[in-house]
Image: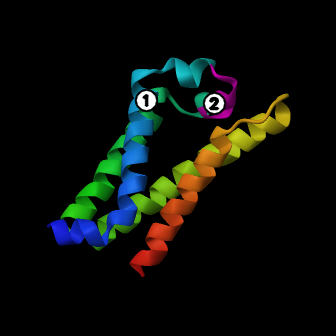
Amino acid sequence: MWKVILLRRYSLGLIVSSIIYGCELLFYPEILENYKVYRYIGDMFDYKVISLAFIVLGFCTLMGVIFDVKQLRRIAVYILMFLWLMFGFSFVLTSITGDQAYTVTVLAFLEAYLAWCVNLREE
């Protein structure tokens, strides 16, 4: 099992950051409700749905890594990549229509890039 985890260590950053981000959104719903940067995401999704999506997909990726299930890993990482891209574009739209730029935009696109790199490495 440890050998598989070491071979898939690049996935761990994406897994941990997605689970922590989902937990933050779940335990602090005012983030999506009050912060300007989350205006579009907060309008589209309930905070429980989006936060649980990050948590569940992070754990699905983790289970795929631990049990070496390639299909589960790939599907979960592709969906995580989509979620991070959706957040990134939402942040870009918010900064275009608002009066300031947000640093979480970089975080979201970096996480999407990390997911893309993890899936490229799987091929």
Residue that badge 2 annotates: 38
Question: Looking at this rendering, what residue extends furthest in the left direction?
Answer: 1
Q: How many marks?
A: 2
Q: Rounded to the nearest whole Å, what is the CA distance between mark 2 and mark 1?
A: 13 Å
Residue that badge 1 annotates: 24
**Element class at badge 1:** helix
From which residue to which does the magenta span run?
35-41
| Residue type pointed to by label 1 | Glu
Relative to 44, residue 106 above or below: below
Q: Earlier in the sequence, mark 2 or mark 1?
A: 1
Q: Is residue 39 a member of the stretch shown in magenta?
A: yes
Location of residue 112 in the rendering, given as x and y in whole percent from the top left corner: 56, 57
**Element class at badge 2:** helix
Q: Main secondary structure of the magenta part?
A: helix
Q: Is residue 54 visible?
A: yes
Q: Is residue 86 visible?
A: no
